[in-house]
Amino acid sequence: MNPSKYFALSPKQKAIDTEAATISFVALSKEPILRKDFLSGAPYYVSIDTKNITFNAKRFYLDHDTSFENAIGTIKESKLDEGGNIKVVVQFFPELSKSHEAFLKYKNNLSDSVSVGFGDWKIEKRDAIEGIAHFHITSGEIIELSAVWEGADKRAKITEFQKTKGVNMNETLQIIELAKIAGKEAQGLEAIKNNTSLKDFSKSLIEESKLTQAPPTPAKKKELCFSLANYAKSVFAGQSVGEIEFSQGSNGYIIPNSFYTRFESTQATTTTQNQRQRGRWGVRGINAQDILKTAGNTSLKTKTQKTLPRLRIPS
């Protein structure tokens, strides 16, 4: 007699942990489910794209009665296994009579089924299966899981929950979302198929991006220009121009040296005070008439001479 075979536990036995009060179930399978219309009794098939199903159920109820009284457990874990089935681990509570009773019913083979409750979903009609109408759920959200006598999905039963296989449900959804954002849906599905982790899939996208990304083109520095002639015209037109601060170099207006030389001929007509004000910059104290003459504008010669508002030039 082979001891290992003699003491081996069946998948159902391994799925029930009496000490931890947990049971593992297949909550939903991807295989087509044969159902009957509630009113007419006509049969039809429903298949589900389990890779695009969001599992958001947090609690375990009795017979889809989502009430305080009928809450008998919580969902500890969920994942999409290598076969495309959504598996869960349900935590029961021995101190709660209904929860403990449900656990014992599963343990003693009085039932082995669960059933999911959908929230939003998208469904489309597909080719018939053996002459029977076929509908396919392309995406959706599971918001509730219940203990039932027999669910619509005959495969939604007690099963072993192997942590070493399959992709965590949350990671699967994140891989799908990341693949959509990156425009790499095919690669995302391949990653899920190969049980690639979210971390490894993200790294592969980053590496691929580094290979295809073009080097950034440096932006051209924009120089700001300023016309003293236009400034003087604004003063004589009575427009408010206020003080203007110039900076030679970065972060300010740039006045080229060639512009300063236009005013060299005005030294004879300015006062000694004006010459002192000019200092090393050669701009401060020049009156508006001289600027207009230098700029070639003689239309304002007969007007009263005005002095430009002070130009502040930081040293």
Image (cartoon, helix red, strand yellow):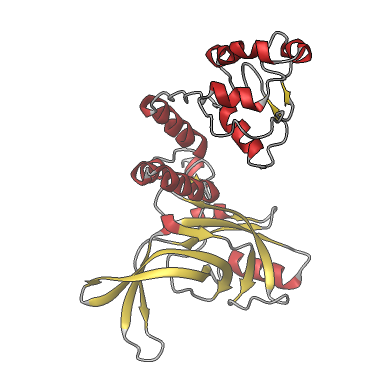
* Quadrant of the rendered image containing residue 190: top left
Q: Which residue is drawn at 47% across and 26% down?
A: 219
**Between residues 10 and 200, which one lies in front from this camera angle?**
200
Q: In this view, does 69 lie to the left or right of 51?
A: right
Q: Where is residue 148 in the image (x, y as percent from the top left)?
A: 55, 74
Which of the image's four quarters has the C terminus?
A: top right
Report whether residue 251 is seen. no
* Residue 110 on image: x %, y %: 56, 72
In this rendering, the answer to whether 78 lies above or below 28 is above
* Rendered view: 165 above or below 301: below
254 or 284: nearer the viewer: 284
Is 193 on the left-hand or right-hand side of 167? left
Q: Position of residue 103 (x, y in %)?
A: 65, 66
**Residue ranking furthest to the front:** 302
Residue 292 visible = yes
Quarter of the figure with residue 60? bottom right
- From this viewpoint, which residue is outermost toward the top? 280
Q: Which residue is at a point 58% across and 68% down the rendered structure image?
A: 144
